[in-house]
Amino acid sequence: MRRVKCKNCGVRNEKLAFLSTNTKYTLRFAMQIGRLCRAMTIQDVAREMRLDWHAVKDPDKIYMREQLARAGHPSPRVIGIDEISIRKKHVYRIVVSDLEQKRAIWFGGEGRREEDMDQFYAFLGHENTANLRLAVMDMWLPFRKSTQAHAPNASVLFDKFHILRHLGEALDKVRKTEYARLTGQRAQVHQRTEICPAFPQGKSDQRGQAEPETTARRQQAVEYGIHFARVIRPTLDMRVRGLGKEVLRQLEITTSLAASCAVREICKDG
C-alpha cells in the first residue's frame, strides 16, 4: 500500500477497494464473517474460524454498516415499536422495525421515555413520518404519545399479547372475587345444613315405610323447595328413574346437596 505526503493534507494512505476500513483484513473476509454471524453466535464463529472474540466482532460491525448503506434511508409505512433490555437495573433501548420489509430500521435512545421515541421520528424525517399509516406497539404510554404527536396520520395498533394479558388479569380478578363470594355463602349453608326425616315421626305411608325415591322427593320438596327431576337428578347425573336409594346415598355423603342454595349454585357452575 502506497503512502502519499501532501503539503496541504499531510500523509494519506492509498485506498484499495478490496480492503476493509480496518486494513488488517480484506473486505471479502469481513463480509464472510458477517454472514456467519447472522446464523451463529460470535463465540461460535470465533471458535470455527480460530479467532479471538473481538477479532470477530469488528468485522461483524463492518458487515452491518455495509448492509445499512446498501439498504438506504428507511421510508416505512407500517412500523413495529418495542424495547429490549441491554443490562440489569432496567436499562432499555428502543427498537423500531419495518414490518413490511421485515427488518429493523432504528435502534437507539437512552431508555423508553417519550423523548427517546422522539429521536426516532427526528431520524426518520418529516416527509417519511407523514407517510406512516400504522404503528404497532405495546400499551406503553410514552410510545403512543410520541407517535400521536409526530405521526397523526398513523393508526395505533396494540399487539394482541398485551391485550390478552390484561384480559386474563381482569378475568382472574373476577374469578377470585366470585370464588370468594360463593365459597363464603356455601360455608354458611353447610353450617346450617341438616338432614331431617322425610315425614313426621310416628307416621308412615300405607305400607308402613316410605319408598326411598318418595323419601328423597319429600325431603327436598317440602323442606328445601327444590324439585327432584329438575335439580337433584341432573346434578347427580341420574338419567334413569327409580334410583331413590342412590339419591339417598348421595345425599348422605354430600349433605350440601340437600340445601337449595348450594344445589342452585352447583347447577349454575355446571
Image: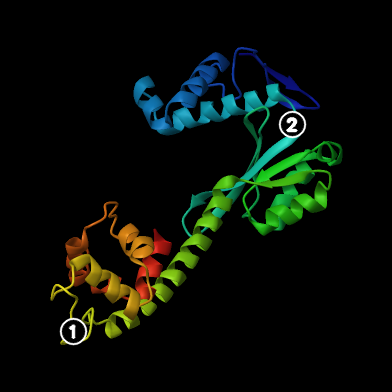
Is residue 248 visible in the rendered image? The answer is: yes
**Which mark is in front, 2 or 1?**
1
Earlier in the chain: of badge 2 and badge 1, it is: 2
Position of 73 compared to 200: left or right?
Answer: right
Q: Quadrant of residue 242?
A: bottom left
The quadrant of the image that shows the C terminus is bottom left
**Residue where numbered disc 1 is placed:** 203
The x and y percentages for residue 269 are 40, 62
Q: Type of residue at label 2?
A: Pro
Labels in figure, total: 2
Q: Position of residue 141 (x, y in %)?
A: 68, 58
Q: Residue at x 17, y 66 (%)?
A: 249
Label 1 Cα crowd, 10 Å radius (few <14 / some 14-19 / many 20+): few
Q: Secondary structure at mark 2?
A: loop
The answer to which image quadrant residue 131 occupies is top right
**Left of 62 or right of it: where is 157?**
right
The spot of residue 218 in percent (x, y) is 28, 74
Task: Name the residue located 50 percent from the left edge and 56 percent from the top edge.
Answer: 168
* Colour convention: rainbow
- In the image, 261 versus 46, the foreground residue is 261
Give the residue at mark 2. 74
Residue drawn at x 58%, y 52% as measured from the top left: 163
Residue type marked 1: Lys
Which sits in the foreground, 94 or 109?
94
C-beta proximity under 8 Å, tags 2 and 1: no
User: For this view, does 11 lie left or right of residue 189?
Assistant: right
Instruction: Identify which residue, 3 or 158, lies in the foreground.
Output: 158
